Amino acid sequence: MTMENVLTVNNLKTYYFSKNNVTPAVDGVSFRLLRGEVLGIVGESGCGKSTVARSILDLLDRSYAKIQGGEILFHEHDLLKLKKKDLNRIRGKKISMIFQNPQSSLNPVFTVGNQIAEILNIHERMTKQETKARVIELLRLVGIPAPETRLTSYPHQLSGGMQQRIMIAIALACNPEVVIADEPTTALDVTIQSQILALMNQIKTKLRMGMLLITHNMGVVAEMCDRVMVMYGGVVVEQGETASIFASPSHPYTKGLLASIPSIKEDKEELYSIPGAVPKLTVPVNHCRFADRCPHAFGKCHESEPPFFEVENGHQAKCWLLEDTAGRTHNG
């Protein structure tokens, strides 16, 4: 059975402009998201992951951030060409977002019930009784105990895990086809993180929605994602099925990320870390962005940006080291 393609991003370019510099935060990113699958976007802070998400829903600060090119197709409709009122009908209803920190995303002066009801009042025609019933249903769906009483609680009266469940309830209120989860478990402890991930996976399967999961945690990727896209310096450096990338990582950056994960099978006093830091680009570049941190870099890496080379079916990586590998061809 062929899975339906619900979201397609082609050659997206989002740049940040300051007085003297141009930062290519997202510089030619392309991917597709299928109904019912989880696509993980992984990389260190500053790699462009959240900028991709905010570009999709037009949540950028246009005083300094501009989309310079590309297209974002939702059921063949380019979101970048829609009028604001038409985009507003999709944003929150068909495509929703779970933000990183619920404490800064939830309004402290409104009850959680009111905040869930707000999205229903914007997009759905419901009576007050129907809205209240739907809010209680959503609270129950995300595992909030005694939802009839919790809907009158304020955010500060809830734990961090329960606050994140409220954020998930808001995102699911209108039964979206796509949910973008931007580091949804970063502010939570390990136990609560596991509960939230299990909840998201359960709901994704039940509602058959596509999920874009943005994280820097490769463990979360292994647990949640069907496919993974590794970003560095505003571009995708490796992509493919999660099992394939974990079994045979091909880009030095991906190998470094996986090597830095602690293992219960090995007794190490010090974890591996990738030397250096993500560069703060001030102009668009045309060479391998990871070259300055890569232990395998050679002359060509500093001169031109590699294309995608095919590692195996659907598994691709941008690295000149793969150019001469037998049986591997690139798709330019």
Image: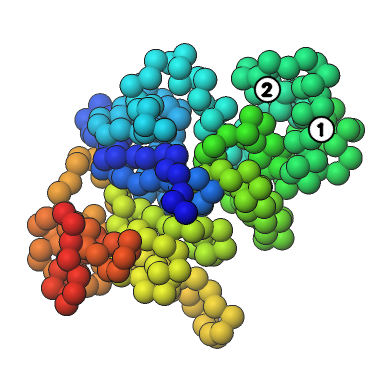
Q: Amino acid at mark 2?
A: Leu
Q: Amino acid at mark 1?
A: Ile
Picture coordinates of residue 247 (x, y %)?
41, 74
Tell me the tag on residue 120.
2
Please identify the quarter of the rendering in which residue 242 is found. bottom left
Q: Nearer the viewer, residue 218 or 71?
A: 71
Q: Residue at x 22, y 30 (%)?
A: 20
Q: Is residue 9 above or below residue 191?
A: above
Picture coordinates of residue 263 (x, y %)?
54, 78
Q: Residue furthest front?
A: 1
Tell me the tag on residue 116.
none
Whether residue 125 is visible here, answered yes or no, is yes
Q: Is residue 244 left or right of residue 10?
A: right
Q: Nearer the viewer, residue 315 or 18?
A: 315
Q: Residue at x 58, y 34 (%)?
A: 176
Q: Residue at x 16, y 54 (%)?
A: 332
Q: How is the image coloured?
A: rainbow
Whether residue 111 is visible here, answered yes or no, is no
Q: Nearer the viewer, residue 99 or 141?
A: 141
Please identify the quarter of the rendering in which residue 277 is found. bottom left
Q: Is residue 271 above or below residue 60?
A: below
Q: Is residue 52 left or right of residue 195?
A: left
**Residue that numbered label 1 is attached to:** 136
Q: Nearer the viewer, residue 220 or 71?
A: 71
Report, in whole angstroms, how far the alpha carbon at label 1 lies from the one at label 2.
13 Å
The numbered mark, 1 or 2, whose residue comes first in the sequence reads: 2
Q: Residue at x 63, y 17 (%)?
A: 122
Picture coordinates of residue 53 (x, y %)?
44, 38
**Helix or strand or loop: what does disc 2 sit on?**
helix
